[in-house]
Image (spheres, rainbow, N blue to C red):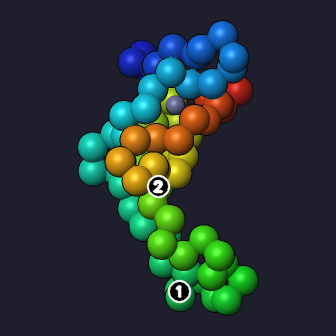
Amino acid sequence: MSDKPAVLPNGFCSNKTPVPGTARQVNAHSLGAKFSRMHGRRYADCPCGKSPALTERGKLRPHKQPTA
Ligand SMILES: [Zn+2]
């Protein structure tokens, strides 16, 4: 991917803006009780290839880019 975001000196991805249209909420009911802790969490894709959780404000949580 050519528009990959930069990596910060601490190893985390510099991008905090989710790719539009990729936000989704975990529906634990379809996954079973084992995943009930994750229920209600929202995720979105980052251009770096990760799918981190979203904050309350709709920003991507700090995450590290996948190593190629
Ligand atoms: Zn990223």
Question: Which SS class for mark 2?
Answer: strand
Where residue 25 sits in the image (x, y, percent)? Answer: 42, 67
Seen at 65% across and 76% down, the residue is 37
Q: Amino acid at mark 1?
A: Ser
Contact between marks 2 and 1 (CB within 8 A): the answer is: no
Q: Amino acid at mark 2?
A: Tyr
Question: Looking at the rendered structure, which numbered label has been put on residue 64?
Answer: none
Where residue 67 sits in the image (x, y, percent)? Answer: 70, 27
Query: Is residue 68 something one can see in this rendering?
Result: no
Q: 9 or 5: which is nearer to us?
A: 9
Seen at 52% across and 46% down, the residue is 51
Q: 68 or 19: which is nearer to us?
A: 19
Seen at 60% across and 71% down, the residue is 38
Q: Nearer the viewer, mark 2 or mark 1?
A: 2
Q: How far apart are labels 2 and 1 at the CA level?
A: 16 Å
Residue 28, image quadrant: bottom right
Above or below, 28 against 60 in this view is: below
Provide the residue designation for mark 2. 43
Query: Dot 1 surroundings within 10 Å: few (below 14), some, or many (20 or more)?
Result: few
Instruction: Looking at the image, tell me whether mark 2 or mark 1 is earlier in sequence order.
Output: 1
Where residue 63 sits in the image (x, y, percent)? Answer: 61, 35
Question: Looking at the rendered structure, which numbered label has been put on residue 30?
Answer: 1
Where does the N terminus fall, quadrant-wise? top left
Q: Is residue 66 left or right of residue 15?
A: right
Above or below, 5 against 40 in this view is: above
